[in-house]
Amino acid sequence: MTQNDASADATAAAPSVQGPVLVTGGTGKTGRRVVARLRELGVETRAASRSGETPFDWADPTTWQAALDGVTAVYITPLDASPSPTPAFVEQAVASEVRRLVLLSARGTDVPGYFGPAYEDGGPHGEGERAVRASGVTWTILRPGWFSQNFSEGVFLDGVRDGELALPTGDGRAAFIDADDIADVAVAALTEDGHAGEEYGLSGPRALGIADVLDEIAKETGKRAAYVPVDASVFRAGLTAQGFTDWEADLWTDALDPITSSREAPVLDGVRRALGREPRDFADFVRDAAARGVWG
C-alpha cells in the first residue's frame, strides 16, 4: 500500500464533525499534517500557533478564547511544561461548547515510572489526559512513541547531517512511529464516529536501535552517520551547556530512557485499531525523507 493509498483509506469517510476544528501547534510535526489532511477533506480548520494564521500561545491564556470561538473540535498538541496549561485550556474549551477533544499524549504516560522523575505521575501528559477524561465531552487520547521525524526535522537531524549522533541510548531499541500515521489517526478521531473514549498506543511495525536507524538512512542516501553511545550525565551536561534549563535537560534525558531500556520496542496496535491498516515502516519514512533531500 502506498502512502497516498493509506491516507485515502484513513480519510475516505465523509466528516461527521461540522464547523471549525482548532489545531493547536498547527505548524508543528503532527499539527501541520493534521491541518493539511482536514483541509483536504473540506473541513474548516484553524491552524493555531504563536506566529500562525490563528494566534495562540500556551503561555498567554488571553489568546485562547478567540481561537476557540465557534469551534466544534480541537486537536491538542500540549506544551511540555510543569504545571501543564492543558487542564485550564480544556476547561475553557468546554465552556466554549467544544464537543470533541483529541489529545496528543505520549507512550508510557499511563505506566508509572516510564519516563523517570521528570515525568512523575505522567508529568504534563498525565495532567492533560486526566483533564480530557474529566471534561464531559467526547475525547480520544493518542499515545505515540518516539517519532521517526526526529531524525529528519527534529532533535536528531543535526547529528545525522554532521555524521555523528551521540545519545545515551546504549543498545536500546524503539518502534519509531511516523508522524503521518499519527496525523491520520488524529484526523479520524476528529472527523469520524467510533473513536470516543479510545486511548490509542501508536508505534511503527518494528523496533530499531539507533545504529539500525543510521544504517537505514545510509542505505538510502549513501551517507553514513556514526552512532556514539554516551553516558546520560554527559548528554545532560551537553544540554545545559546549550542553554537548556535543569528541568528541560532532565526531561529530555529521562525521555530517552525508554529507548535505552527498550521499553519503546514492543509494537502497539493503535494504528491498526484506529485505521484498519498497518503503520508505515521506518524504511518508507527514510525513502520519502531522502527524496526531499532532508539529509543533503
Image (cartoon, helix red, strand yellow):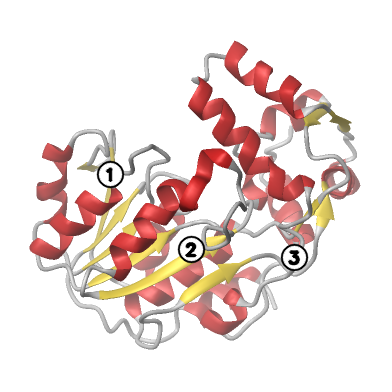
Q: Secondary structure at mark 2?
A: helix
Q: Position of residue 152 (x, y in %)?
A: 66, 41
Q: Tell which of 83 and 269 is nearer to you.
A: 83
User: In the picture, which quadrant includes the N terminus?
Assistant: bottom right
Residue 45 visible to the viewer: yes
Query: Mark 2: which amino acid?
Result: Ala
Q: On residue 281, which mark appears? A: 3
Residue labelled with disc 2: 183
Ranked by sequence position, the earlier of labels 1 and 3 is 1
Residue 271 vertical position relative to residue 212 in the rendered view, above or below: below
The image quadrant of residue 23 is bottom left
Ranked by sequence position, the earlier of labels 2 and 1 is 1
Instruction: Tell me the residue at 58%/59% (across/down).
Output: 108
Query: Label 3 crowding class (10 Å Cα cut-off): few <14, some 14-19, many 20+?
Result: some
Query: Mark 3: which amino acid?
Result: Asp
Calculate the distance from the C-alpha at mark 1 to the C-alpha at mark 3.
34 Å
Query: Mark 1: which amino acid?
Result: Pro
Residue labelled with disc 1: 85
